[in-house]
Amino acid sequence: MESLYREGLREYFGNPNGKINGLEILKVAAQNGHKEAKYVCGMILLCSEDDELRKQGLEYMRFLRMSKCVVGSRKKVKQLVNFVWKNNRLLGRNQSPLCNSKSTCKGWRVKRGSWALLDDDDDINLCEYCRWDSELELFYQLFNVH
């Protein structure tokens, strides 16, 4: 699965014409249990403007959350891509947050005091959408998306 994961990353981020094919390769690795592929797929899908794709992304991220490996997966992705795919122009920032009630939400920031996710030890009662909005910010930073 590691080779599929790396091939999917290379196709998606390294080839403007391979974006869709790369995502499909990443999905195959993710569906076969590769956690970093699940993380990348989930985050790419959460970047989408399409609500159905965002729902699919949430499913990947919920799996990782229940497995308590969101942060570990992010760290492994960061190690691999740190110098390879920075400043790519293929990944777009979705301007619509998942949490639609940021001004009144008593979500993730109540526990952490900031938007940074430091570990996978989280409280299920806090706003899940705030958590994934926060994770998206970290993902955007990873790939230097403005």
Image (tube, helix red, strand yellow):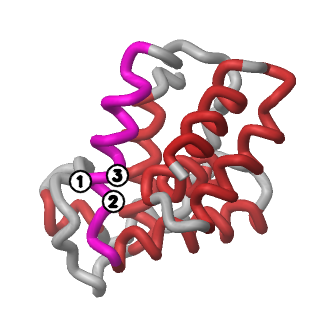
Q: Determine the CA span between mark 3 and mark 2.
A: 5 Å
Residue lying farthest to the bottom in this orientation: 125
Magenta stretch: helix, strand or loop mostly = helix
Residue lying farthest to the right in this orientation: 17
Tag 3: Cα neighbours inside 10 Å, few (<14), some, or many (≥20)? some
Q: Mark 2 vs mark 1: which is more N-terminal? A: 2
**Location of residue 49 in the rendering, given as x and y in whole percent from the top left corner:** 75, 50
**How many discs mark residues in the rendered view?**
3
> Image quadrant of residue 119?
bottom left
For badge 3, the amino acid type reads Ser
Q: What stretch is highlighted in magenta?
A: 67-83
Please name the residue that numbered disc 2 is placed on: 70
Please name the residue that numbered disc 1 is placed on: 117
**Location of residue 124 in the rendering, given as x and y in whole percent from the top left corner:** 29, 84
Q: Residue at x 35, y 79 (%)?
A: 66
Contact? badges 3 and 2 (CB < 8 Å): yes
Q: Mark 3 vs mark 1: which is more N-terminal? A: 3
**Location of residue 104 in the rendering, given as x and y in whole percent from the top left corner:** 38, 69
For badge 1, the amino acid type reads Leu
**Location of residue 110 in the rendering, given as x and y in whole percent from the top left corner:** 18, 67
Q: Determine the CA span between mark 2 and mark 1.
A: 9 Å
- Residue 32 placement, left or right of 110: right
Q: Determine the CA span between mark 3 and mark 1.
A: 13 Å
- Where 11 sits versus 127, above or below? above
Please name the residue that numbered disc 3 is placed on: 73
